Image: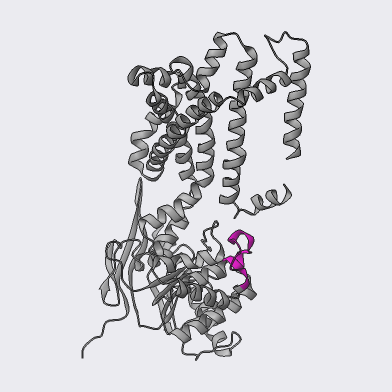
Amino acid sequence: MIMTESYLSIDHLHKEFPRRGDRPLNVLGDLDVHVEEGALLSILGPSGCGKSTLLNIINGLDDATTGEVRLAGRKVSTRTRSDVKIGVVFQQPRLLAWRTVRNNVALPLQEMGLPKDEIDDRVRRYLALVGLAEFADYYPLQLSGGMQQRVSLARGLAIEPDLLLADEPFSALDEFSARRLRQEFVRIWAETGKTILFVTHNIREAVFLSSRLLVITDRPARTYLDLPVTVPHPRKPEDDLLFELEKSVTEDFMRMEEQVRLEKEMTR
Amino acid sequence: MWRRTLSVLALLVLWQIVSLFMKPTILPSPIAVFAQLGQNLTQPETYSQLGVTMFRVVVGMIAGVAVGMIIGLTMGLTKIGEDLLDTWVLVLFTIPALVYGILCILWFGLNDTAAIVAIAVGSAPPIAINIWQGTKAIDRDLIHMGKAFRFGKATVLLKIVVPQLIPYILAALRYGLGIAWKIVTIVELIGLSSGVGYMLSYWFGNFSMIQVLAWTLLFTITLLIIEFAILKPLENRLTRWRPAAQIQRGAA
């Protein structure tokens, strides 16, 4: 049988950061993940466990110490960034305060060299999508944190990426905004069929969104759990099946934390 | 705005009162000085002298700003640049403007070049220092955002780095302009035979207090016009995205 290559394959990925006068900081330890095209994969892990580093390596902003990342059949590194169109949404909005909302969303599109009509059209569509159509001419600092984050989401989506890297994009929002955006987010994913990597430390969010869920351990990050979420979309946040899953993942998560704690005590 | 007007008026009143107790050769009254300035302004020579000085300042400043910005950015954005240049910039910054004036006259002779080079050399270090400090305050997360979205190097520099430096660039411009005026008067005073500094020296030689003050006043007014007609509007336009700046402007 011929093995077809995954859309995104992460093989024996290991990353450490040198530290002055100390042992290097081991962030990713032998991580293996294979992601099929069109997946919405949640990566769930404790804070500071190297999830952002993983996204940076996939985007070609940082190099692995050993191991490799292949995206759409090509090896990714800082020198050979993938030509797959990658959109990014960060935990903080990271908007340019001196540009209007419209011009913030438009900037990556201008960089892509799209024609002006197309840019105007996309900016209008994606701002409407995140519910900010009438705020296009505002400056970011005139908006609330939640609204800024929605602008950031619109910016990430407007380039119509083949792969979207989302780094805890809803974690700084109030629960109601987050809930509405999650539903929109899933709808966009279902409509476009693009691949999404969604980093979060919110178990309920991960369960609600994903088609597949990856739990990784604290530094150095390794896969602890990899399970599909088969509940069909559109889902309701109050779905019993999702609750059950959330409960079992939470238990696994607690068990993992406990295990790490014990290991630490053993080595002490 | 009315507060500013009030403080200027208060000074003029004080000047008038003090001048009543002084001989006109020591301190002429503001009315007399303004009258003299008004009369000077009817003469074409005044404009040509002012124009010569302005030309030297503008050309010298353009060179100083360009060099200062390049040095400041190099120091701020690269570790090598900082290590190689920071001592020199600080040394050049501490040398008195008078020294640059003297050196340039000795090197280039009694001409425009001497004045322009002296201004450029004298204003570049403070501009470099301002920009350098500005780069320390740059939000690295925004640069990371630009890289994540694959902006080219030029776009990151021009659309993410430089806009964050604008308050520092404006501060540097003001500071550089102040220094440039000081240097140009010194150079004109000690060596050249044209410009506002030369006129000051000429009237000083004739013991004409009223003309010395009239020319100083012309100089001050020119600076105020540059500040309120060019720098302030530019600053307001470039920082209108700041909520605080908008409130201020709305109240003014």
Q: Is residue B95 magenta?
A: no
Asked whether residue B174 appears in the rendered view, the answer is yes
| Spot occupied by residue A201 in the image (x, y as percentages of width and height) | 51, 70
User: Which is more toward the observer, A216 or B97?
Assistant: B97
The residue lying toward the viewer, choosing from A114 and A180, is A114
- With respect to residue A177, does A139 lie above or below? above
Q: Residue at 57% of width from left, 8% of height from top?
A: B206
Quadrant holding the N terminus of chain B: top right
Q: In this view of the protein, can residue A203 be seen by the observer?
A: no
Image coordinates for residue A126, horizontal then vertical, percent:
52, 76
Name the image colouring. Answer: one colour
Q: Is residue B85 above or below residue B104?
A: below
Question: What is the magenta segment's predominant secondary structure?
Answer: helix
Which percent across, then down, holds residue A212? 43, 82
| A217 sits to left or right of B19 | left
Q: Residue furthest left?
A: A1
| Residue B214: image location, x then y, percent | 63, 21
Dividing the picture into quarters, in which one does residue A85 lie?
bottom left
Q: How many marks?
A: 0
Residue drawn at point x = 40 percent, y = 17 percent = B102
Residue occupying the point 26% across, 77% down: A73
Which range is magenta? A134-148
